[in-house]
Amino acid sequence: MLTIASRVDVMNRLGRAMADPTRSRILLSLLAGPGYPAELARELELTRTNVSNHLTCLRGCGIVVAEPEGRKTRYEIADPHLASALTALVDVTLAVDEQVPCIDPACTVPGCCAPATGDPS
């Protein structure tokens, strides 16, 4: 049975994994099916080293698993329940208050940190 502490650990691991835009892109790709580092790098227009480093992080968080296939390694979402949960999560409609400024000065989310335009009245 999961305790509150273990549930917090799960949430922290998921948050860490999804907080990085590159890891999020890799996860979205893996939701479509298993992938290989070289293919993911090509598809996402990243270096293979960058993809491998992010896959290592995702493995460390327990979100993806690696399956050796000869000289290649196949990566996939660790659990079908997690894949379903991630799919449901990305299908959510967020209620974003565009009048509230982003608190992350390094934020790269399109539209998040842009100043509000127009008259709010």
Image: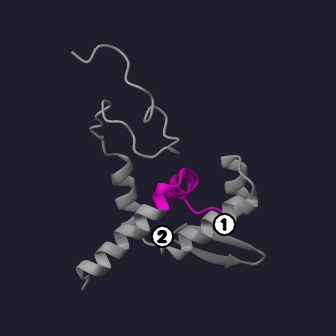
State if disc 2 and disc 1 touch (CB < 8 Å): no
The residue segment tinted magenta is 17-35
Horizontal and vertical percent for residue 70?
A: 76, 78
Residue at the image point whose x is 31% and y is 80% from the top: 6
Horizontal and vertical percent for residue 8?
A: 31, 73
Examine the rendering and report whether any part of residue 18 can be seen. yes
Q: Is residue 80 magenta?
A: no
SS under mark 1: helix
Which mark is in front, 1 or 2?
A: 1
* C-alpha span from label 1 to label 2: 14 Å
Q: In this view, does 71 lie above or below 89?
A: below
Horizontal and vertical percent for residue 15?
A: 41, 62
Coloring basis for residues = one colour
Mark number for residue 18?
A: none
Quadrant location of residue 49? bottom right
Pointer 1 local density, CA inside 10 Å: few below 14, some 14–19, many at least 20: few
Quadrant location of residue 41? bottom right
Which residue, given by chain and number where applicable, does mark 1 sit on? 53
- Split into 4 quadrants, where in the image is the N terminus? bottom left
Residue type, label 1: Asn
Residue found at the far bottom of this picture = 1
SS under mark 2: loop
- Split into 4 quadrants, where in the image is the C terminus? top left
Residue at the image point whose x is 46% and y is 57% from the top: 18
Residue at the image point whose x is 68% and y is 66% from the top: 52
Residue type, label 2: Ile
Which residue, given by chain and number where applicable, does mark 2 sit on? 63
Instruction: Judge by depth and name the residue closer to the eye, 61 or 86.
Output: 61
Horizontal and vertical percent for residue 93?
A: 30, 40
